[in-house]
Amino acid sequence: MKYCRNCLQPDTRPNSRFTPDGLCPACDYFDRLKEVDWQERYDILTELLANAPRRPGQMFDCIIGVSGGKDSSRQALWVRDKLGLKPLLVCLSYPPEQVTERGADNIANLIELGFDVVISAPAPQTWQRLMAESFARFTNWAKSTELALFSSVPQIAIRYGIPLILWGENPGLQLGDLKTLGKTGYDGNNLRYMNTLAGGAADWMYEAGATERELLPYQYPSPDAFEAHGLQIVYLGWFLGDWSLVNNGMYSAASGLRLRTDTVDHTGDLKGVTSLDEDWVTLNQMIKFYKFGFGRVTDYVNEEIRLGRMSREAGIALVENYDDACSPDYIASFCAYIGITVEAFWEQVRASVNRELFDIAADGRITRKFQVGVGL
């Protein structure tokens, strides 16, 4: 395990590769942004939008997937108010046991701001069953739900005949998932190859007994379907020089976005701006830490370090204190939903801990072998 020489990104992030001089992909990209002409990028975007194909009778200029969170809210506002487009917002709704009141309020806020929103809601019994199976097989309850989340946007684009999908950040450049890189910095059609979607995504669900009909919401359209319907995903983050966790949260909060009020030792959320629509993602961020050696706080501080708003030393202290943060209440509510005990939850988590990076004591405590910022 090695760390980026600039930020606190370890080389354990899936699909990541450091430069020969020790920079993670995101820091390497950020360094190159210093030479970017942002007006030129904006001109590229306006030309791209002007030449985007339109279908007869098409009522919306583009589709944007939204959760009601900071990124999607900022995108919707910027696309409408800066670019003058009429977007159709697409939201995949969680079951009542999972969605937060805050998340529902934030979607309502987008509607009150004047946006048209289509809400997709997969069958809740299938959702629950596949979530339990995801956790049992992969110690990752979101393995199935993320398939539905990512698939809903292009599925609805096809059904509404809207070929242009505007997405947020480029995970290849801005996070380091290099398999998602397309022909250009804004080409998002390789999003299908990201860690969440790649590699026989639905096979295990069929093995678990799900039927083809039940899995319709979980099927990402094929490359042939993208070509047949002329779909194009464009990463908006490539065109925005101030795209970041904190900035997007501030912009969206100014337009009515409700933020988190829980404490960082319960959430690992330093500013209360991430995953506002549900709380169980906090479990997955903790488990991500135990699998790969980095969690939600690492992602936060890396941006702040790159932007010069935080020192590496201050970031190390925050990561050491909070990268595995997760409220016991969130764990208990998740366990009740999928029908397991909290003890069974921790047995599953401990069985999935990366033993090269962590030790497990006799009393079950999980401790780091590595030094944050240094590695092994």
Image (cartoon, rainbow, N blue to C red):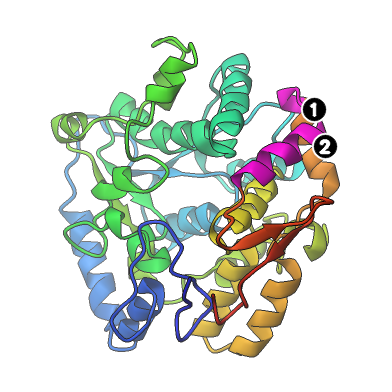
Taking the image as drawn, is residue 95 in sight? yes
Inspect the magenta stretch and tell me whether residue 342 lies in it. Answer: yes
- What residue is shown with label 2? 332
Residue placed at 48% from the left, 77% from the top? 3
Q: Is residue 13 magenta?
A: no
- Give the residue type that dot 2 points to: Ala
Expressed as whole percent of the image width and height from the top left, the position of residue 123 reads 57, 16
Q: Amino acid at mark 1?
A: Ala
Residue carrying label 1 = 336
249 lies above or below 18 = above
325 or 373, which lies in front? 373
Circles 1, 2 touching at the beta carbon (< 8 Å): yes
Q: Position of residue 367 (x, y in %)?
A: 72, 63
Q: Residues within 10 Å of mark 2 (few under 14, many from 20)?
A: some
- What secondary structure is marked by label 1? helix
Stretch in magenta:
337-352
Q: Is residue 6 left or right of residue 342?
A: left
Q: Is residue 271 positioned above or below 231 on the image?
A: below
Rendering coords of residue 371 (x, y %): 62, 78
